[in-house]
Image (cartoon, rainbow, N blue to C red):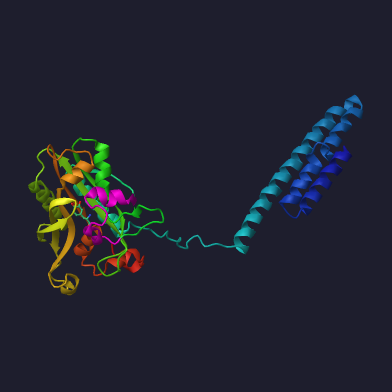
Amino acid sequence: MNELQALEAQGLTELAACGDAAALRAWNTQYFGDSGKMKAAMGQIGKLPKDQKAAFGAEANRVKAALTAAYETALAAKNEEELQRGLTTNPYDVTLPGRPRARGRLHPATQILRQIYAIFADLGFQIYRTREVETDELNFELLNMPAHHPARDMWDTFFTTTPGVVLRTHTSPGQIHVMREAAGKPIRVILPGMCYRNEAISTRSEIQFYQVEGLVIGEGVTMADLKGTITAFARRMFGPERQVRIRSSYFPFTEPSIEVDIDWPKDDPNRDRLTKGTGWLEILGAGMVHPNVLRAGGYDPEKVTGFAFGMGPQRMLMLKHAIDDIRLFWQNDLRFLKQF
Ligand code: DAH
């Protein structure tokens, strides 16, 4: 019995001497582990005379409960103490505002492309994607420009090291891809994408730029359909107060051909400089698809007709917001981009 009381007293003294939670846990193993002191003390019971066993057992259980309770109280106190110490030696201010995440936005060119898609979707057009690297055959020849045709000079071309392979100078070669895939069925698509020209860079031209091509083919398609489509598009894009001008023009792949201009904002001081004194900026070329081009796509010009157009989305952005330099689009200057 005295042994049990001595064990209790020793246990409590040692417990009080534990400096931290780790020491407390070591104490716990020493007293209550598989080969701990408590177990050893309980083992004594077998050697006792029968009449002492019950009292010894009861006392052992009391000591065990007292030590366990003391241990749990001490451990909880130590944990709390350590938490408080951590909070004061390494304080953090939960009232500090967080760091805001920088929010991105769509590039203005992407924004205008999506507006164009939405308008043409309402007019019943599908979007058809075609390649940026083309053959000379599709970029020129099948668009009614045989080798050495002077009209090729309209496009200063980037050639690749593979003979006959070029970076497309316009989205028009996509017309041939669509026609060949549609294989004689009626067509109403737009073909958006990047084009490349080996040009002197200026405020109005860049070596890379977006175009959105359009192609409609079917029985009885006329110039009136082309003009109606383009005018409806321009009204939606620029609003009813802006003027649309249609001029006759020349492209090898259309006959007859037109060009379409929009009037530059009248109140913009740069108007004369940017429109070379005319007040107009061209947004697209268009026309009735040339019979040779229809044939190249596998369509019979005796049975169907079609119209096509190729527009410059970045020119449209310039017109909408009176932007005076097309080079701003690819300079990635946030001061410019954040305005959209
Ligand atoms: N491909 C022409 C260019 O890049 C634009 C164009 C004109 C496209 C007339 C057409 C068209 O589809 O019919 O200058």
Relative placement, left or right, of 207 versus 87 is: left
Is 211 situated above or below 42?
below
Which is more toward the observer, 57 or 81? 81
Q: Residue furthest left?
A: 224
Residue at 28 percent across and 55 percent down: it is 111
Residue at 25 percent across and 58 percent down: it is 152
Please provide percent x and percent y for residue 164. 35, 52
Which is more toward the observer, 204 or 139? 139
Q: Is residue 338 visible?
A: no
Where is ligand 1, by quadrant? Answer: bottom left
Q: Residue furthest front?
A: 148
Residue at 9 percent across and 40 percent down: it is 220
- Give the total of numbered labels: 0
Q: Quadrant of residue 330?
A: bottom left
Point out the image quarter for the C terminus: bottom left
Which is more toward the observer, 78 or 140? 140
Q: Quadrant of residue 199?
A: bottom left
Q: Is residue 249 visible?
A: yes
Report the span colored magenta: 132-156
Point out the image quarter for the N terminus: top right
Check residue 218 for magenta coloring.
Answer: no
Residue at 40 percent across and 53 percent down: it is 162
Which is more toward the observer, 157 or 267? 157
Please provide percent x and percent y for residue 286. 16, 53
Please provide percent x and percent y for residue 250. 15, 57
Q: Residue furthest top?
A: 50
Is 72 situated above or below 333?
above
Relative placement, left or right, of 140 versus 82 is: left
Check residue 154 for magenta coloring.
Answer: yes
Please provide percent x and percent y for residue 184. 21, 35
